[in-house]
Amino acid sequence: MICITKDADFVNSFHLSRKPYKLLLVSTGNIRNQELEALFLANLERIAEGFAQFDFIEIDRKVIIFHI
């Protein structure tokens, strides 16, 4: 299961207790739903491939960060 959130508090929980198991942090700030959907669709393959290696991924409007 992958937790998708914009709430940075999940990052602390992830680092302290490895919960949630997989975390996708959306760091876009305010964004329209249509823009967010387009962002996910454009990057879905890279995100899915990233979760094969990484447990914590962060996405903003320009980059995807794969955290170790």
Image: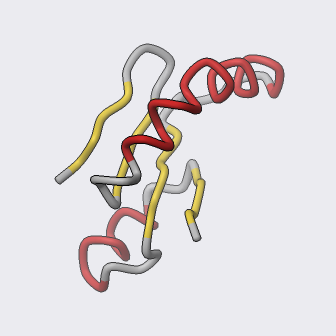
> Residue at position x 54%, y 56% from top?
7
- Is 17 situated left or right of 23 in this image? left
> Residue at position x 70%, y 26% from top?
36
User: Is residue 13 or residue 44 the one in the foreground?
Assistant: 44
* Up-down relation of residue 19 to residue 24 (above or below): below
Q: Quadrant of residue 5?
A: bottom right
- Is 14 situated left or right of 28 in this image? left
Residue at the limit of the structure toward the left, as seen here: 68
User: Is residue 27 or residue 22 the one in the foreground?
Assistant: 22
Percent from the top left, x then y, of residue 34?
A: 82, 20
> Residue at position x 48%, y 51% from top?
24
Q: How many marks?
A: 0
Quadrant of image for the N terminus:
bottom right
Percent from the top left, x then y, of residue 2?
A: 56, 63
Percent from the top left, x then y, of residue 61?
A: 50, 18
User: Is residue 11 or residue 22 the one in the foreground?
Assistant: 22
Q: How is the image coloured?
A: secondary structure
Residue at the limit of the structure toward the right, as seen here: 34
Residue at the limit of the structure toward the bottom, as seen here: 17
> Residue at position x 44%, y 65% from top?
22
Q: Quadrant of residue 59?
A: top left
* Up-down relation of residue 6 to residue 39 (above or below): below
